[in-house]
Amino acid sequence: MTISYWNGRYLPLDEVHVSPLDRGFLFADGLYEVTAAYNGRLFEPEAHIARLQRGMAELRIDCALSAGDWMAIMERLAAESGIDGDLTVYLQVTRGAASSRGHAFPAGVTPSVFGMASPLKRPPASWRDQGVAAITIPDIRWGRCDLKTVALLGSVLAQQAATDAGVVDALQLRDGLVTEGAATNIFVVKNGVIATPLNDNRILEGITRTVILRLAAEAGLRLEERDIPAAELETADEIWIASTTKEITPVTSLNGKPVGTGAPGMVWRRMFALFAERLGR
Ligand SMILES: Cc1ncc(COP(=O)(O)O)c(C=O)c1O
């Protein structure tokens, strides 16, 4: 049985018991992170910890763990997972379990912290060779998409819409603008210029997105953070989706129509090569 972390202890996953009064269970009052580890090395763990800590500060979840403590948990889960190969470490912190149910923050409650490692299913080679299909859907999520909360029903419904349509992702549109995929950031390329939605409350600041921004700057590629009208998806040369588990995946068919030439584009090829190098591949 996989080892997990639960409130200060390392124990088999099936020995973790969560109170029904935990606010994660009752209110989705919590945050999470998914960090990849390649060849036994965590990828950008400091950035994941910083995002978690920022989320806790925003939501006033007062957790005693330091950045070093979070790192130690991730490292131990990765090292003792027994998983042969690449993996992800999942971390979750909720506001904790109060003695009764009530919406406002309860006093004197200790946050619940959970972690586990799972095998990383890397994107199949066909996604890189041919790209993937996606659809567009309305973004029905709340106004704080910058927080990586466990309130994931919007993402669940978006991913299910994609699954029902037989495609890999659903690109969400809000007020005529592109926001995010079901659990990915979106990049659009036109005439060699990469664009991605602004980092504000409408999107999650993806760690993969941050890495792409850095790699583009280092390589001298033109990248703009700006509002992207939905119409630009129709005329794009390339569309990419990016996340920890989807890495950088080209979208070559949108709503049943080819994107650009209908094959992964040159700018994606360049970016993916830089990214693969960062992953140590
Ligand atoms: C809504 C949303 N946007 C973007 C991302 C990509 O974030 P990251 O690159 O940190 O995995 C995720 C990842 O789960 C997500 O849920």
Image: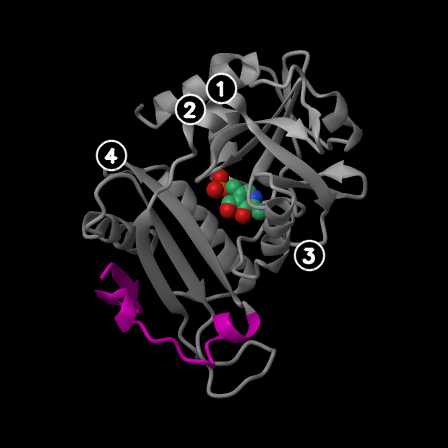
Amino acid type of the residue tagged 4 in the rendering: Asn
- Label for residue 39? 4
Using the numbered discs, state the Cα–Cα distance from disc 4 to disc 3 in whole angstroms: 37 Å
Q: Start and end of the magenta stretch?
A: 1-27
Which residue is located at x 41 percent, y 80 percent? Answer: 19
Q: Which residue is mark 1?
A: 271
Q: Are marks 3 and 1 in contact (CB under 8 Å)?
A: no
Q: Which residue sits at x=57%, y=15%?
A: 265
Helix, strand or loop at mark 2: helix
Q: Quadrant where the N terminus lies? A: bottom left
Q: Quadrant of residue 240?
A: top right
Q: Does the numbered disc 4 mark a residue whose Cβ is under 8 Å from ligand 1?
A: no
Q: Is residue 258 left or right of residue 168?
A: right
Looking at the image, tell me whether mark 3 or mark 1 is earlier in sequence order: 3
Secondary structure of the residue carrying tag 3 is: loop
Residue 103: x and y in percent read 61, 78
In this rendering, the answer to whether 34 lies above or below 239 is below
Indicate the amino acid at tag 2: Phe
- Give residue 275's mark: 2
Relative to residue 108, is residue 69 depicted above or below? above
Spatial CA span between label 3 and label 1: 31 Å
Q: Position of residue 264 (x, y in %)?
A: 55, 19
Tell whether label 1 touches label 2 (CB within 8 Å): yes
Residue at mark 3? 142
